[in-house]
Image (spheres, rainbow, N blue to C red):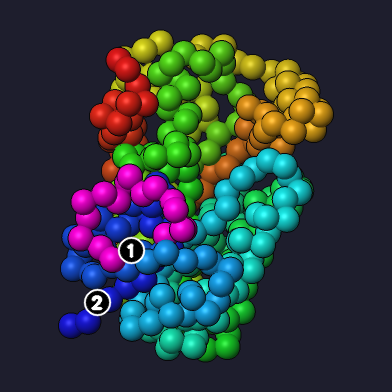
Amino acid sequence: MDKSLFITGADGLLGSNSVRELLAQGYSVRALIQPGRKVKSLEGLPIEKVEGDLLDETKLRNAMKGCRYVIHGAACTAMWPDNNPVVRKVNIEGTRCLLNACKENGVERLVYIGTANSFGAGSIDQPGNESKPYTAAKYKNDYMASKYEAHQLVLDYVKKGLNAVIVNPTFMLGAYDSAPSSGAMILAVVNQQVPGYSPGGKNYICVKDAAKGVVNAIEKGRTGECYILGNENLNFKDAFAKMANVAGVKAPGFAIPKWVLLLYGGMGSTVARITGKAPKVSYTIARISCDEFYYSSLKAVKELDLPQTPIENGIREALDWFKENGYLKN
């Protein structure tokens, strides 16, 4: 049986883990790689790599030719500055180019990797789900807005006949985080660079579980449906405590007041606008860290057989990978 698949964003945290899950499930993988980009997280894997750009529809169409399935995970994830034309171009127009290429190649199933933030969050007692409307517009951030618009674009193409499913991961933890992306939080806790915890919280998932959800969506997802890929809802105090416990370091024990965080973020944004250098914490990031982003993954667990591995496993695997690759000395 032909299980040929084309994937974008293959060298990212979720992409690297998804490629490994694809190979484990017997898929043959062709990965789109940006020209000149180093792909350490994919070294040694039996996959075909093709160089190309999301915004070059002709090359994109040729690159995926002959593949039955497509996973689109590439995106520009920059949160600074809030208004960023590059982010919008890559995430929206790049997705449009890919959708057109899928239609022209007669792709049998597309799995689009969105974000849980495209749905409204909730409290720990009543977490958000796939039926909750988008609420992140209040942050006026182009990354969040562009991912939501791309999400809607995929649904529009489904109405035009494209067989597509959307998966919406929450905050992922695990190995092959070469940027690092979400793992930067773990590194900060381990290196004792987190002075305290903010009032907010979010949903966490082991990236291996999220990758299984992505791959399972190829055959198990329903056309036009969305699936939040998450697991455990934790406030930042409890999340940092888990990270510190796994790493064997002291957990941040100081509750940072909301007004202090917002002031710090505001100062960071002001300095960044003057210097042109991205801040460690912008005003938008400060606002987000004070809010709750709790979600339910019941639908994905039921329909995609999404695993629910304790997030301590993801933290441990991230730490092991960071140590092996020189991100941590001790």
Q: Position of residue 320 (x, y in %)?
A: 26, 29
In the displayed image of the protein, which residue is found farthest to the front?
A: 36
Residue for point 43% across, 80% down:
62
Q: Is residue 223 visible?
A: no
Decide which of 314, 177 is in the foreground and name it. 177
Of marks 1 and 2, the one in the foreground: 1
Q: Which residues are magenta?
A: 33-49
User: Which numbered dot is residue 175?
Assistant: none
- Choose top left, top right, bottom left or bottom right for residue 278: top right
* Residue 4 shows in this picture: yes
The residue depicted at 74 percent of the width and 33 percent of the height is 276
Is residue 116 left or right of 290 when viewed as pictured? Answer: left
Residue 18 horizontal/vertical position (percent): 32, 57
Could you tell me the amino acid type at mark 1? Answer: Lys
Left/right of residue 149 with respect to residue 167 in the rendered view:
right
- Taking 283 as reference, is 89 above or below it? below
The residue that mark 1 highlights is: 49
Q: Is residue 174 above or below residue 238?
A: below
Q: Of marks 1 and 2, which one's residue comes earlier in the chain?
A: 2
Query: Left of 328 or right of it: where is 225?
Result: right
For the residues labelled 1 and 2, the Cα–Cα distance comes to 17 Å
Going 52% across and 27% down the picture, which residue do you hit?
Answer: 236
Tell me, for residue 3, which label it has, or none: 2
